[in-house]
Amino acid sequence: MMERRDFVRTLGAAALGQVLQPRTPRPYPRTPLRKLDRIGLQLYTVRHQMEKDFEGTIARVAATGYREVEFVGYFGRTPRDVRALLDHHGLSAPSSHVSLAPEQWRGALDAAPIVGHRYLVIAWIPPEERRTLDDYKRAAERLSRAATEARAAGLQFAYHNHDFEFAPLDGKLPYDVLLAETDPNLVQLEVDLYWIVKGGQDPLAYFARWPGRFPMVHVKDSGPPPDHRMVEVGAGKIDFKRIFAQRDQAGIQHFFVEHDEPADAFVSIRASYEYLKRLEF
């Protein structure tokens, strides 16, 4: 029978052997990759189809897999008819592009809660109203007044960019003036990723400078310079994985695919959807 001291000595040697054996380093846990849970479409992409067949176009958008849409007009339908159609196809419309022309603006404020919009977006400043930095400051005042009215109606106001806001005036970028001259709580931004890149800017720099101010993005892709031809999402040079990885910093809640002039709108929206459905970031 093994003596107690021999037994203890044997256990000690075994334990020492375990201590001295090289250990495989335990890998640090990786942050799980994310995917978009809802993909939206800016309906400007299919505007010509909606002119011909409003109901059928909405049905095809839903059948493609989109779950959100952003409007730019209702093509003669009433807000209640639009809402019924969206509900029928399992779609929501968190946002709409609108006009600040008084009658149209009032109509947009009234229609928004019926259709289900939470955001009203201005997407254009006429050329004659943006020749100087002072013009942009006056534009910021108009945006702020509209945003105050939207807030009173329980809505959030936002501004959508093109590339003209990134052409310097007197050493400043007009986009920077618009952001600095408006209250972040009143005027938020829908950043168009194609136009900001075409304008020579990095959206991540704006996300870092103005965190939380970008609840929506237009997801559209660009070919290489100098032409910057608009292409389906995933077919160009914009690094959406890099951009979407900062969605929390930016505050992005809604991702709207868009193509201004697709060769075939339904082929285009499907190609963009399929790319985004697979994208991990």
Image (tube, rainbow, N blue to C red):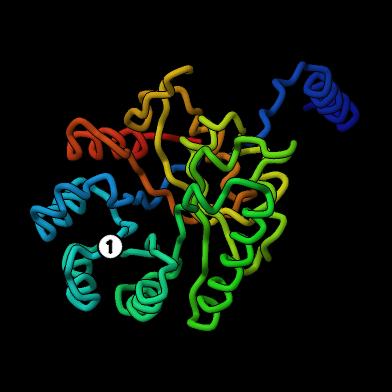
| Residue positioned 37% across, 37% down in the render | 276
Q: What residue is pinned by disc 1?
A: 73
Residue 128 lies, with reference to residue 187, above or below; the image says above
| Residue positioned 64% across, 56% down in the render | 212
Q: Is residue 274 left or right of residue 51?
A: right
Q: Amino acid at mark 1?
A: Gly
Measuring from the top left, give residue 34's x and y in whole percent. Answer: 49, 42
Q: Is residue 92 left or right of residue 155?
A: left
Q: Is residue 68 visible?
A: no
Element under disc 1: loop
Q: Compare residues 11 and 7 and report the one nearer the observer.
A: 11
Count of numbered badges drawn on the protein: 1
Residue 231 lies, with reference to residue 266, above or below; the image says above
Q: Is residue 32 left or right of residue 11?
A: left
Measuring from the top left, give residue 123's x and y in whole percent. Answer: 45, 54
Measuring from the top left, give residue 167's x and y in whole percent. Answer: 60, 35
Q: Compare residues 48 and 41 and report the one nearer the observer.
A: 48
- The image quadrant of residue 5 is top right
Residue 171 lies, with reference to residue 69, above or below; the image says above
| Residue positioned 39% across, 78% down in the render | 106
Identify the residue at the far right of this view: 5
Measuring from the top left, give residue 99's x and y in whole percent. Answer: 40, 64
Q: Compare residues 272 and 55 and report the one nearer the observer.
A: 55
- The image quadrant of residue 113 is bottom left
Crowding near the residue tagged with mark 1, few <14, some 14–19, many ≥20 C-alpha atoms within 10 Å = some
